[in-house]
Amino acid sequence: MTRRKDLLDIESLSREEIDHLLSAARPFKDLLRRSVGKVPPLRGRHVLTLFYEPSTRTRSSFEIAAKRLSADVTNFTVSTSSVVKGESIIDTIDTLQAMQVDYIIVRHGSSGVPNLIARHTAASVINAGDGHHAHPTQGLLDAFTMQEALGQNLAGRRIVIIGDILHSRVARSTSTILTKLGAEVAFFGPGSLIPADRRQGIPALRTFDEVFDWKPDVIYLLRIQMERQKDQFFPSLREYHRLYGVTDERLAVIRQRGLPIMHPGPVNRGVELVDSVMTYEHCLINDQVENGIACRMAVLHWLQPKTAVRAMD
Ligand code: CP
């Protein structure tokens, strides 16, 4: 299979490429579990993380993945860089390119910035989340985690994604990869946070009773993203929790059915879910974090920068 230079979204990946990345992540997970130190594929390569927005999971996960593959890693701290003096994205990239980096992991609040950078550099660019647009490695790690929980073939499996679909790059990337793998997806949340132009005929459920009647195999909760909401989309967080949150009563139904619960993090306790979800036996939130490293190792290993391979000692 031809290797790509960049990973910018899930939409542009073929089914074959998705299957390849999910399969490639499995031995990397075994390797992480066996505590084998580093493996050599990215020896002599340099990975730069460039995050214009905060991150706990994605950034550290990429850093661990790159180091496990023997790459050197530099974390570019936007808040203490010349970006705060007004340096443009392209000038920043030109400067970093001159330092011979091979991979740029970028997160930005505006959709399309990773694409812009990818067209401007020989380094491989991985989108670590851009605006409302895409978060492709989150989609991969979610699909990988569901395969572990439900079996490798997700065709016909039902996943309900609950919450702020409108502002969520996670909802977009995860629903796209699941659809490509043959799973059925439904959305549930405040009407104001469900996009009217839903693609691929994704149904919108209106109540939690409808969610349970739809017989999902996975409950996937999204974070309410206050920082992306310019308008008020629902009356209050208490009201959101009452209508759309996993309460103790709803958790009892979920437990009785043995349904996995997933969430990309960070969670808003008392809003999307009650505390007891975090200790629920089929809560997969920590599995998602662990699987993120294996999936990102698979992505880094697969991509092919157009930078020169430097001599190794
Ligand atoms: N899921 C996710 O993108 O988390 P971070 O914002 O912590 O990277």
Image (cartoon, helix red, strand yellow):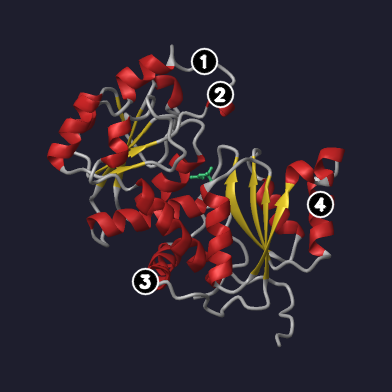
Badge 2: residue crowd in 10 Å (few <14, some 14–19, many ≥20): few
Task: Say what amino acid the circle numbered 4 marks.
Answer: Thr
Residue 223 pos. (x, y %): 44, 33
Task: Say what amino acid the circle numbered 2 marks.
Answer: Gln
The residue under label 1 is 232
Q: How many marks?
A: 4
Mark 3 vs mark 1: which is more N-terminal?
3
Badge 1: residue crowd in 10 Å (few <14, some 14–19, many ≥20): few
Residue 218 pos. (x, y %): 26, 43
Q: Rounded to the nearest whole Å, what is the CA distance between mark 3 and mark 2?
A: 40 Å
Q: Is mark 2 within 8 Å of ligand 1?
A: no
Task: Say what amino acid the circle numbered 1 marks.
Answer: Gln
The residue under label 4 is 92
Residue 184 seen in the figure = yes
- Say whether residue 151 is left or right of residue 234: left
Residue at x-position 41% and y-position 35%: 222
Q: Secondary structure at mark 1?
A: loop
